[in-house]
Image (cartoon, grey):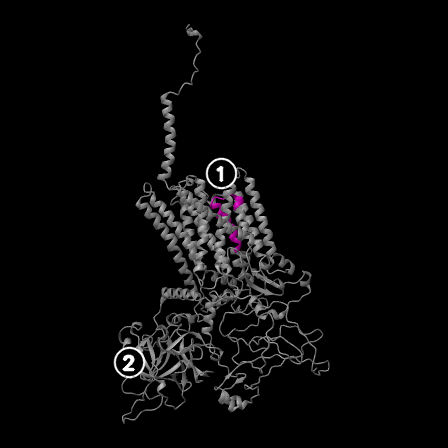
Amino acid sequence: MARSAGGAKAPARRPSPAPPQQQLQHQQQVASTKKSKALKRKDDYTSEGVDDNDVFLLPISDYQVMFTVTAVAAIVRLFRIYQPTSVVFDEVHFGGFASKYIKGKFFMDVHPPLAKLLITLFGWLAGFNGDFDFKEIGKDYLEPNVPYVAMRLFPALCGVLLAPTMFLTLKAAGCRTFTATLGAGLIIFENGLLTQARLILLDSPLMITTAFTALAFTSFSNQQELGPTKAFQPSWWFWLVMTGLGLGMTVSVKWVGLFTIAWVGLLTLVQLWVLLGDYKNVSVRLLTKHFTARVFCLIVIPVTFYMAMFAVHFLCLVNPGDGDGFMSSEFQSTLNSKGMQDVPADVLMGSRVSIRHVNTQGGYLHSHPLMYPTGSKQQQITLYPHKDDNNIWLLENQTQPLDIHGQPINGTTAWNNLPELPYITNGAVLRLYHEPTHRRLHSHDVRPPITEADWQNEVSAYGYEGFDGDANDFFRVEIVKPKSKGGVSQDRIRTIDTKFRLVHVMTGCVLFSHKVKLPEWASEQQEVTCARGGTLPNSLWYIESNEHPLLGETSDKVNYANPGFFGKFWELQKVMWKTNAGLVESHAWDSRPESWPILRRGINFWGKDHRQIYLMGNPIIWWSATAAVVLYVLFKGVAVLRWQRNCGDYSSPTFKRFDYEIGTSVLGWALHYFPFYLMQRQLFLHHYFPALYFAIIAFCQVYDFVTARVPGIGLRERPIINRAGATAFLALSIVVFWLFSPIAYGNQWTKSECSRVKLFTTWDFDCNTFLDSYDAYSVVPSVAAAQTPQKSVNAQAPPPVQVPVGGAQQVQAPIAEGKPEVSGAPPPPGQRILSREERIEYRDQNGNILNEEQVKALEGKVEFKTRYETRTRVVDANGNEIPNPDVKIEPEAASVAPPHPDVQGVDQETPVRLVPDEPIAAAKSVEGEKEREEKVAKPASEGNDATAKGEAEAAPEVVPEVIPEAVPTAEAAAAA
């Protein structure tokens, strides 16, 4: 039976659908929103997830934090900046450069001048007159009243400003205030940066200029990523100009700034590449405008600033100095008193000339009345960097000229009145007569005293007054036309313009010189040999001065061409580059790049009075920064693999910002770190500091992303975690800083505390330097002998030895500046020094004493060696000598500041007359002596070495009048 309609169950009612018109509008709105976002990403080069982080628009609270950070940095950096009160590490170099700036004496250093000029300015404003020479580590500042604190103040202020610069850089990168404070705190409490900022060194100015450049470019990048609305606005222009200025300052402090230029350059190319891809909004004209702005700000401004610093450098250094030997003759002629009057152009037989070497900074062919100790034992021929009468040579023909009767005209004036000018043409055979000693330039098949190679022959001066010489005096002139000036200078010898070789007629070898120094018996002048197959540059010579009676006032004159600023600038850059590349000698405290990120070892800067300054970073900060770099590298590797699998990670703005922002910092780290692997020169831990700065930025950015920006892990919503973590990590860093602070400040420390924190044997600061307790420092007086004797390394006496005299022992100190130095050992208890006396004795090889007549007969024939001896006589209260006293003198406990190891040249204050003493037997080596010598502080040879070598080359010749202990030859022994 069918149911009624009323009894049937009604179907459930569905909700009424929206009217078709409303559905269509909603769909259009969603599509429009998506389309607008997509169009914005495609049509606008604005980066996603970027806010305006202009550091001039920060809240007041951030500026308060910044000023607080600056005040803390000032306290930490300036605390006891007056200690040590003596020269530390490379203050030897950079303090010495300040002295030379004030005196106007030219020097050569491998670093640009900006930081050195500013250090000099601070010293000059404090009253420094340049009289202090900074020659030795440990040389006292107080007695000569050197304003060293003012000179240290400039690097210290740079170190202070580094902390707020880090704070602002992190804020410009979008980090939270606590993260920026953490980064500034890590800079403040980094022990290595502290140590460098308290001394007269260049690394602290380098760090602040690098940091300023990073701040400026980070701020500019932030403005650039905000899109077209910010382009070419005042803030955009300001930070772009500041970036260029920062680059100029950085590269004007050290050439490490080239790595900063590379960092900015690569990121600038990325920006231009993004602009190039925005073809809808960036026209060719607009792209050209972007490109031109960057060329002007990032190339023109830095180059102009860099060259301006050298212009100031040249204005300050107007007098000859230790470094002018590195420069060409044209360069040297621009210095006061180095300029030369116009000289006759034509060179004739009978001309009295000075002959200069072309390649090795233009030393003069030179001789002096000292003999070679080996080989022929004839008179020495050297290369000498200064003008001197011993540089004058008379050019003679191989035969004497004939008179009207056909008879030879004898004597050195034979060519003075000839009817025709006897030009010296290509192929002419000459004899070179040394008028001061009446000997001629000579060569023979005898090996040189230093370069004992088969292809090198000795060059000597041979003969006597009135002696006609022999065939080994003949040298043939070969004009090298490609190196000579055009015209007549390629046909005959003309002053300055003609470059020529001197070929020995008998053996075919060529007069040659190279950068090999002769020992002290030749005043450490440069070796001259006669080489078969020697390189052309080392075989080229030219004539600088020229005199002849037949060349009057009407004869053609020549002089050096003035190179002008650009010529001097470019020449100095080439010399700096060549010298820097040549610093390949090992150093006791150098290290290689692979050891820097893990802080494997430091540098011993200074040691005295049971204190030590040792450059070492804060391990927590270094290792954390390195871990951040490693973490990003691992992240990038995984991100690339996922990108290749099309996982879509880069669709997240936070992911992209993490990759780009931290990648920018890691790129800065890499560009300031990996280039050092390509260098074979000396490298030190402080070369890692710019890379460390970028690594600390990367660490702070990683921390900020993890604790405050990455969604989905629950930390972004809890800002307390960001603050607590930053506070805890900074507190840990401060504790570690405090543990290692005694070797940063040079404070008192104990052996136990030192040993407790010395975690690795490669941290080679010496804990035995310190006393057992702090109370012991109050009873141990400062040892006066800890000051390094002030004398040149060139004139250094033999190493100290121990000589048993009547059972007593005393440690000998080298004699400096002609005055006896007191031994570092204190006198025995209850005894005092009554008097000191000096005496000179000459002995032969058998120890026999020579009288005055025997010594005079041996002068110029034998080599004399200097021996020093300190003897101790013990007397009783009545003045009677005690024959066998039981005396033990303990060696000095305090660490003695070592002498500067890089040869600085003969000390101008060292007397010419040496102080000899009787010979002594060689003492036995003290156990551990070499090991202790290797651990003493030594200045880096960075540039530094360049000036040192330059000073050695530029040192005046010292020919001792009184020469100590005789070591006669067979003939001398017979005479004795």
Give the mark nearest the N terminus, 1 or 2: 2
Q: Residue at x 54, y 44 (%)?
A: 178
Residue 807 screen position, x and y as percent: 67, 79
Dot in front, 1 or 2: 1
Disc 1 marks a residue whose amino acid type is Pro
State the count of labels. Answer: 2
Vertical placement of residue 32 versus 371, above or below: above
Residue 488 screen position, x and y as percent: 27, 76
Q: Quadrant of residue 75?
A: bottom right
Q: Is residue 123 visible in this depiction of the protein? A: yes
Q: Nearer the viewer, residue 678 or 460?
A: 678
Q: Is residue 488 left or right of residue 621?
A: left
Q: Quadrant of residue 653?
A: top left
Name the main secondary structure of what is drawn in magenta. helix
Q: Nearer the viewer, residue 17 or 605?
A: 17
Residue 394 screen position, x and y as percent: 36, 84
Boundaries of the magenta span: 159-179
Disc 2 marks a residue whose amino acid type is Thr
Secondary structure under the numbered disc 2 in the rendered image: loop
Q: Quadrant of residue 746?
A: bottom right
Taking the view exactly as shown, the residue that stands out farthest to the right is: 877
Can you identify the residue that label 2 sits on?
425
Dot 1: within a 10 Å radius of its alpha carbon, few (fewer than 14), some, or many (20 or more) residues?
few
Dot 2: within a 10 Å radius of its alpha carbon, few (fewer than 14), some, or many (20 or more) residues?
some
Can you identify the residue that label 1 sits on?
711
